[in-house]
């Protein structure tokens, strides 16, 4: 990750940012599951993309397929 602060950033704010990054690195070393299990505070944790492709479940909206994409138009 490349960080490019502007000239208006104070040395104190840069030091705080550097300390936050170091704290994150320490947390990763001590509790790696926090990174590997992320995200943990969202309605859907981790999507299973393989299952989504294999068990395709498409539901048309109230107006049906739009743009001539319905099977009956072919």
Image: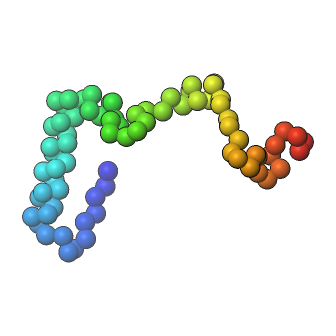
Direction bottom: furthest residue: 8
Identified at 33% across, 30% down, the residue is 37
19 relative to 50, above or below:
below
- Residue 6 percent coordinates (x, y): 25, 71
Residue 72 is left or right of residue 13, and the answer is right
Q: Can you tell which quarter of the image residue 58 is in?
A: top right
Direction left: furthest residue: 12
- Residue 46 percent coordinates (x, y): 43, 33
* Foreground residue among 41 and 13: 41
Identified at 89% across, 44% down, the residue is 73
29 relative to 15, above or below:
above
- Residue 71 percent coordinates (x, y): 84, 39
* Foreground residue among 22 and 54: 54
71 relative to 13, above or below:
above
Identified at 16% across, 50% down, the residue is 20
Snapshot colouring = rainbow
- Residue 10 percent coordinates (x, y): 13, 69
How many numbered discs, if any?
0
Residue 69 is left or right of residue 51, and the answer is right
In the picture, which quadrant includes the C terminus?
top right
* Foreground residue among 63 and 69: 63
Identified at 16% across, 53% down, the residue is 18
Q: Can you tell which quarter of the image residue 29 is in?
A: top left
């Amino acid at each position: 990750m490349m960080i490019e602060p502007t000239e208006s950033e104070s040395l104190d704010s840069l030091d705080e940012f550097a300390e936050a990054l170091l704290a994150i690195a320490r947390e990763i070393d001590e509790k790696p599951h926090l990174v590997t299990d992320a995200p943990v505070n969202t309605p859907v944790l981790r999507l299973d993309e393989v299952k989504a492709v294999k068990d395709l479940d498409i539901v048309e909206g109230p107006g049906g397929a739009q743009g001539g994409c319905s099977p009956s138009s072919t």
